[in-house]
Image (cartoon, grey):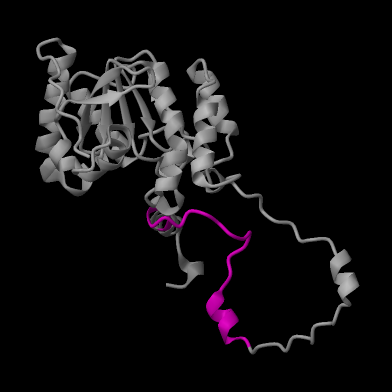
Amino acid sequence: MPPDAWDRDSLVALLDFHVAAGIDLALDETPHDRFAEAATPAVALPRPVQVPAAAALSRPAPPSFPAAAAGPPEQVAADARALAATAEDLAALRALVEAFDGCALKRTARQLVFADGNPQADVMLVGEAPGADEDRDGRPFVGRSGQLLDRMLDAIGLDRSAVYLANTVPWRPPGNRTPTPGEVAICLPFVRRQIALVRPRILITLGAAATATLLDRKDGITKTRGRWLAYAGEDGGSVPAMPMLHPAYLLRQPADKRLAWRDLLALRRTLDGRDGPELASPSPT
């Protein structure tokens, strides 16, 4: 079908396909028909003019995009730790993260995705990173996986007014790729400070990445899910933490929703005081 014969629904469906595939950034104001350009005979380019060395040295340098990180990742992560420690409340922490230029993900994301829900909640849930829907909305867990998470919470009598939601990385990686270890290390001080300021009674890590980052567990989410572990806080104390399967995983593997249901029931029993969290042994080194 030629492009001029497409109706509005077909165009919207095409755009949705590209967004789902991670192609959600326009690089030019107008589209280009690269096939037509390839069929056009090449035009001979004029011979470059030889510029004297003195003139070349005096020519102003072309503009360059500023580097996101001012130093190696280890130094930037140390700077982030020092910066995060100065935040006295969540509003101050959000402002610091908004102004922080040490993570390259900020350059490609539309906006910061800081948190959602109730900062005074007993339960804090932390995922890995925002997706395309979250990047557009500015809140975590608003896409398909977020809608499933809402239904999961509702099944045990919770909603966003009773929990606090965040991610280990607050900017969307391009194309929804996995954040690099360096990006995670740079952003980790901010989410750790976020947990310290919220002071949740229970911490839920959603998925393998958040579990490995916050609980230092490398043995896989299917082995750690549903177990009570200890999150080591900034003040030397600990918070009972349970890894759970990420809603995005459950959308791909719906048969494992039965496992998520068991974990949700365990969370509900703990909140009701019927079961105390029995913490598992620390991760082997």
> Which of the two residues, 163 or 95, is positioned nearer the viewer here?
95
Q: Is residue 29 placed above or below 51 in the rendered structure?
A: above
Name which residue lies at 57% across and 86% down: 39
Residue at the far top in the pictured view: 273
Q: Is residue 218 placed above or below 275 in the rendered structure?
A: below
Left or right, 150 with respect to 193, comes to left
Image quarter hosting the C terminus: top left
Left or right, 79 with respect to 187, comes to right
From the top left corner, tell me how far across and down residue 81 is, in percent. 49, 30
From the top left corner, tell me how far across and down residue 9 is, in percent. 41, 55
Q: Is residue 208 visible?
A: yes
> Which of the two residues, 239 or 37, is positioned nearer the viewer here?
239
How many numbered discs, if any? 0
Which corner quadrant of the image does residue 154 belong to?
A: top left
Q: Which residues are magenta?
A: 18-40
> Which of the two residues, 254 or 171, is positioned nearer the viewer here?
171
Name which residue lies at 76% across and 61% down: 62
Name which residue lies at 12% across and 16% down: 269
> Which of the two residues, 59 or 81, is positioned nearer the viewer here?
81
From the top left corner, tell me how far across and down residue 137 is, in percent. 46, 36
Question: Residue 33 colored magenta?
Answer: yes
Which corner quadrant of the image does residue 145 belong to?
A: top left
Name which residue lies at 56% across and 32% down: 98
Left or right, 96 with respect to 171, comes to right
From the top left corner, tell me how far across and down residue 190 is, in percent. 46, 29
Q: Is residue 109 visible?
A: no
Image quarter hosting the N terminus: bottom left
Which corner quadrant of the image does residue 205 belong to?
A: top left
Secondary structure predominantly adopted by residues drawn in magenta? loop
